[in-house]
Image (cartoon, grey):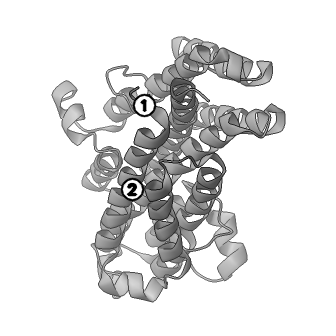
């Protein structure tokens, strides 16, 4: 496969996954903002969302106040923000158009229709009218894109690069969400959390919101069958291989697909991916928490970033003659 084709497929899937992840975070933050809380707490929630995406500085250059309206405008429709839903959906569509011949008709039409319909909804003011319904639509279109891709494309290199992009982006987002939300909710401490609770009821809603942002609330209830505990949430979203958006599940999928496209120059990247997968597979949550969750997730994000750079060097950049 030509490296430029692999590059477009890889980034098409990353951008679509990023659009979904942004919609998930915005939806949860919006619903949490409807709960009784102080203005400072509400503002911290929106600041945390900007921090997850490392967009605090970029936001400050365009808006003077951190509030729901400004953050949602910045994260939904602002084309100058490369992580906005609008920018991601457009980039996914442009990458798909560039490799139209490598996609099935169903995959291309899904990407193209998503972009057309997204702009229609924005112009009609659907995001302002009912943000929750709008974000659910974005999530649905991402689910549809993945389903059509897996259901119609040949299981060859094209599909493998699409899957690699999806799960690498998902791993990055889950780690960022965990890092920022856990620090905000526990002050960095997992034991003695009650010192920072306003009430047990408020605490429940905040932890359930973290789980809902990764479609993990029902999964948590099924697996643990008890009250929502910070350490159990961390375990579910980091170490459970059967949780679709956990770090372990994402790395399992990434390594599986990397092995299927391996070439003569990718051995080091594959080794690093396998090492990260093994570290997650044999880790224990008590060890992670005792050494510090923030430090662990920061290192994980660095390793995922390094892995993405390695994939770019090995597969996505044309080799000089």
Between circles 1 and 2, the one closer to the viewer is: 1
**Quadrant of the snapshot with the N terminus:** top right
The residue singled out by tag 2 in the image is 176
Helix, strand or loop for disc 2 = helix
Instruction: Answer whether residue 70 is visible to the viewer in this image.
Output: yes
Q: Position of residue 165 (x, y in %)?
A: 55, 42
176 w.r.t. 102: above or below = below
Q: Position of residue 186 (x, y in %)?
A: 33, 74
The residue singled out by tag 1 in the image is 319
Along the horizontal axis of the image, is 66 left or right of 320? Answer: left
Instruction: Answer whether residue 174 is visible to the viewer in this image.
Output: no
Q: Residue at x 56, y 31 (%)?
A: 6
Q: Residue at x 51, y 70 (%)?
A: 238
The front one of 17 and 117 is 17
Question: In the displayed image of the protein, which residue is found farthest to the right?
Answer: 151
Q: Position of residue 207 (x, y in %)?
A: 49, 67
Along the horizontal axis of the image, is 64 left or right of 29? Answer: left
Q: Residue at x 34, y 52 (%)?
A: 45
Q: CA distance from mark 1 to mark 2?
A: 33 Å
Along the horizontal axis of the image, is 163 left or right of 92? Answer: right
- Image quadrant in which you'd find residue 35: bottom left
Along the horizontal axis of the image, is 287 left or right of 10? Answer: left
Sequence-wise first label, 1 or 2: 2
The front one of 36 and 220 is 220
Q: Residues within 10 Å of mark 1 (few under 14, many from 20)?
A: few
44 w.r.t. 126: above or below = below
């Amino acid at each position: 496969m030509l490296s430029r084709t692999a590059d477009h497929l890889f980034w098409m899937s990353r951008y679509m996954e990023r659009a979904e992840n942004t919609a998930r975070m915005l939806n949860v933050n919006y619903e949490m903002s409807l709960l009784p809380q102080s203005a400072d707490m509400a503002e911290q929630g929106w600041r945390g969302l900007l921090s997850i995406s490392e967009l605090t500085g970029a936001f400050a250059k365009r808006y003077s106040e951190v509030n729901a309206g400004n953050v949602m405008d910045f994260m939904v429709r602002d084309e100058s923000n490369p992580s906005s839903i609008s920018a991601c959906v457009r980039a996914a569509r442009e990458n798909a158009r560039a490799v139209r011949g490598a996609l099935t008709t169903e995959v291309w039409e899904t990407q193209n229709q998503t972009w057309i319909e997204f702009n229609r909804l924005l112009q009609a003011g659907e995001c302002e009218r009912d943000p929750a319904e709008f974000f659910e639509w974005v999530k649905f279109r991402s689910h549809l894109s993945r389903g059509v891709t897996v259901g119609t494309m040949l299981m060859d290199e094209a599909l493998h690069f699409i899957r690699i992009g999806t799960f690498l982006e998902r791993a990055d987002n889950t780690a960022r969400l965990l890092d920022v939300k856990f620090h905000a909710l526990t002050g960095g401490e997992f034991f003695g959390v009650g010192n920072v609770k306003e009430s047990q009821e408020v605490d429940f809603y905040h932890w359930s919101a973290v789980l809902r942002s990764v479609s993990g609330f029902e999964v948590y209830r099924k697996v643990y069958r008890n009250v929502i505990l910070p350490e159990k949430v961390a375990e579910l979203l980091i170490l459970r291989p059967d949780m679709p958006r956990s770090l372990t599940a994402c790395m399992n999928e990434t390594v599986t697909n990397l092995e299927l496209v391996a070439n003569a120059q990718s051995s080091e990247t594959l080794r690093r991916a396998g090492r990260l997968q093994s570290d997650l597979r044999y880790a224990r949550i008590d060890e992670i928490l005792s050494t510090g969750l923030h430090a662990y997730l920061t290192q994980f994000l660095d390793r995922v970033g390094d892995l993405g750079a390695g994939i770019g060097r090995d597969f996505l950049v044309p080799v000089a003659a």
